[in-house]
Image: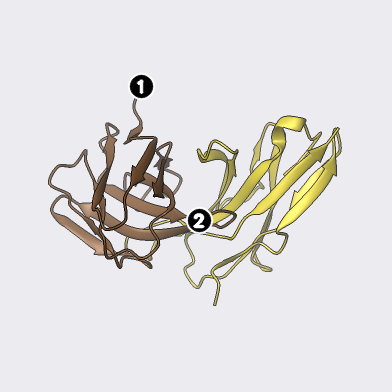
Chain colours: A brown, B yellow
């Protein structure tokens, strides 16, 4: 079955360390997205990519970096510059603008800074 | 200005009763889609229902229906016959055709609690 796989499900990081969250999709979707969710809040866009080797900043990109070397993969690195990285991170993908309904989420990664 | 507004941070409903969760949106794009998601404590985003801006009829999916009032820019979710398993966070979201990136924009969510 096609879908999005995020790993790991839970991640602990020491202050000052970089950490990379994985997002892989086998839906043949062109576009991929990273969202951050704080407790009791909505989702905020960190980065998105509409095509391989191209990506754009979202609303809260500071302290994060991404790459899109393959269509299937869109890893997110939380750098030490991110002041408050403890949050729930969701990855999503879509096929493009023509089919607005087509939007799939992964199951998320919960990152905790210890 | 907020693109998606959910004015009810939390709501209670008695089991087996219907409940309406409010959502208003703001866009100048004539072509857009509106979504409702359920998020249980596990964190996964469960797609519930979708309404396209050109759809003539209100969307329905089982116990979920979307009360779409385009002129008022309102897209309220109606859950009929509430069940205990409906207790969760609910998010309204919008996608616009002419939005660079075509990402989903989310409201702040409503926490629904179903009382037995």
Answer with left or right where residue B66 lies relative to residue B48.
right
* Residue occupying image coordinates x 37% and y 45%: A92
Rendered position, A82 above or below A49: below
- Report the quarter where the N terminus of chain B lies: bottom right
Answer with left or right where residue A38 lies relative to residue B72.
left
Expressed as whole percent of the image width and height from the top left, the position of residue B50 reads: 56, 45
Of residue B7 and residue A13, the one placed in the foreground of this image is A13
Q: Say which residue label 2 marks.
A: A38
Expressed as whole percent of the image width and height from the top left, the position of residue B41 reads: 59, 38
Of residue B27 and residue B17, the one placed in the foreground of this image is B17
SS category of the residue bearing label 2: loop
SS category of the residue bearing label 1: loop
- Disc 2 to disc 1: CB gap under 8 Å: no
Of residue A71 and residue A81, the one placed in the foreground of this image is A81
Rendered position, A64 above or below A104: below
Answer with left or right where residue B27 lies relative to residue A113.
right
Label 2, label 1: how many angstroms apart (C-alpha)?
30 Å
- Report the quarter where the C terminus of chain B lies: top right
Expressed as whole percent of the image width and height from the top left, the position of residue B63 reads: 72, 34
* Residue occupying image coordinates x 30% and y 33%: A27
Expressed as whole percent of the image width and height from the top left, the position of residue A100 reads: 43, 50
Pointer 2 indicates a residue of which chain? A
Pointer 1 indicates a residue of which chain? A
Q: Residue furthest top?
A: A1
What is the crowding at mark 2: few (fewer than 14 residues within 10 Å), some, or many (at least 20)? few
Mark sitting on residue A1:
1
């Amino acid at each position: 079955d096609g879908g999005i796989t995020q790993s790991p499900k839970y991640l602990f990081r020491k202050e000052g360390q970089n950490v990379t969250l994985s997002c892989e999709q086998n839906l043949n979707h062109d576009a991929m997205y990273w969202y951050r969710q704080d407790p009791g809040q909505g989702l905020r866009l960190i980065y998105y990519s509409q095509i391989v080797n191209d990506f754009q900043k979202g609303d809260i990109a500071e302290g994060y970096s991404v790459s899109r070397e393959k269509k299937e993969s869109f890893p997110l690195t939380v750098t030490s510059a991110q002041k408050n990285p403890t949050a729930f991170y969701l990855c999503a993908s879509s096929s493009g603008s023509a089919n607005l309904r087509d939007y799939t989420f992964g199951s998320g990664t919960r990152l905790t800074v210890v | 200005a907020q693109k998606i507004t959910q004015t009810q941070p939390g709501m209670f409903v008695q089991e087996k009763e219907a409940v309406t969760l409010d959502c208003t949106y703001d866009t100048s794009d004539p072509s857009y889609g509106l979504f409702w998601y359920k998020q249980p404590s596990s964190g996964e985003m469960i797609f519930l229902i979708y309404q396209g801006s050109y759809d003539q009829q209100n969307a329905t999916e089982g116990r979920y229906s979307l009360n779409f009032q385009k002129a008022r820019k309102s897209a309220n979710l109606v859950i009929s016959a509430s069940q205990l398993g409906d207790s969760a966070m609910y998010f309204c979201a919008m996608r616009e055709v002419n939005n660079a990136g075509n990402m989903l924009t989310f409201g702040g969510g409503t926490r629904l609690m179903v009382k037995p």
